[in-house]
Image (spheres, grey):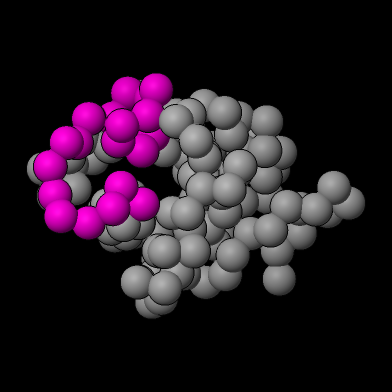
Amino acid sequence: MPHVRVDGVRLEYQERGQGSVPVVLTPGGRWGGYVMNVVATELARDFRVITWDRPNTDGASDVVLAGEGSEADLWADLLAGLIRALGLGPCYVGEYAGCRTTPLLTFKHPSLVRGLMLADRKSTRLN
């Protein structure tokens, strides 16, 4: 699996699709990016989709046990670094299962976010 280093932390990610519009998906809970496979595969029909493994989850990224901020703040800052490293910003961002990463990224790094992806059973269309 490809990876980048952001602030010394190894972040594993997977890319799908060839679209010109990037979408970065973040899983919730302690799950790695693989739990987004179904949604990512569907979106990859029209978009460039990136899923990633946040640190301290069951994915392949590093475990981080240091720092002053909350784990969610760490994830938001690392996601910002991933977006910068892959040249994706501004991009659409989405998440699964109540993860706090995407709203914090949007608040802390608004120049990297084109819009929030909100799931709806009827459509995956982004405007």
Q: What residue occupies the far right of the structure in this picture?
A: 122
Vertical side of 3 occupied by 125: above or below: below
Vertical side of 33 occupied by 98: above or below: below
Question: In this image, 96 relative to 10: left or right?
Answer: right
In the rendered view of the protein, which quadrant contains the C terminus?
Answer: bottom right
Foreground residue among 68 and 119: 68
Residue 74 percent location from the top left of the image:
27, 52
Question: In this image, 86 relative to 123: left or right?
Answer: left
Question: In this image, 103 relative to 119: left or right?
Answer: left
Question: In this image, 2 relative to 118: left or right?
Answer: left
Residue appearing at x 12%, y 42% in the figure:
66
Q: Main secondary structure of the magenta part?
A: loop
Residue appearing at x 14%, y 49% in the figure:
67
**Residue 81 picture quarter:** bottom left
Residue 6 percent location from the top left of the image:
19, 48
Residue 52 percent location from the top left of the image:
41, 38
The span picked out in magenta is 53-72
Vertical side of 78 occupied by 92: above or below: below
